[in-house]
Image: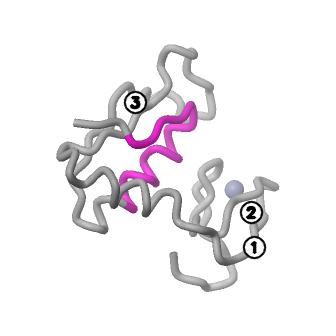
Amino acid sequence: MKRVFSSFNQTAVYHARNLLENAGIETLVKNAVLSSAMGELPPAECQAELWVLDEADYGRAEEILCRPVTGKDWTCVCGETLGAQFSQCWRCAAFRSDGRAA
Ligand SMILES: [Zn+2]
């Protein structure tokens, strides 16, 4: 197993997991704290981690997560600024409204 991504933002970790699982890469999320869904920041030691189960997938996973951004950042209705690679806000879970697929 190899860690490919980590963040204090649990939703970002789960979003990254979805991207990888859509690509057929098996993953495991560690240290997820469910209470953060309510907007609380977890303690520093509870940074959520995304691991790929098969290290052979690591390069591909990294490529997916670090894929060059082709579009502009967008601003959610809640005011959060998100990168073009994200189709959903990690703060309020709203989908971007311009109709672009992920
Ligand atoms: Zn939002």
Q: Earlier in the sequence, mark 3 or mark 1?
A: 3
Badge 3: how crowded within 10 Å, few (<14), some, or many (20+)? some
Say which of marks 2 and 1 sits in front.
Answer: 1
Residue 17 left/right relative to 102: left
Gap in angstroms between the C-alphas marked 2 and 1: 13 Å
Location of residue 18 (image quadrant): bottom left
Residue at the spot x=22%, y=45% of the render? 55
Disc on res. 32: 3
Q: Are marks 3 and 1 in contact (CB under 8 Å)?
A: no
Disc on res. 76: 2
Inspect the image, locate mark 3, and give the three-letter code of the amino acid beneath it. Ala
Magenta segment, which residues?
A: 4-19
Instruction: Residue 94: give x, y in percent of width and height.
Output: 61, 62
Q: In the image, is residue 86 part of the stretch drawn in magenta? A: no
Q: Which residue is mark 1?
A: 72
Give the answer, above or below, for where 60 lies relative to 48.
below
Q: Nearer the viewer, residue 98 or 37?
A: 98
Q: Are marks 2 and 1 in contact (CB under 8 Å)?
A: no
Say which of marks 3 and 1 sits in front.
Answer: 1
Mark 2 CB near ligand 1 (8 Å cut): yes
Gap in angstroms between the C-alphas marked 3 and 1: 29 Å
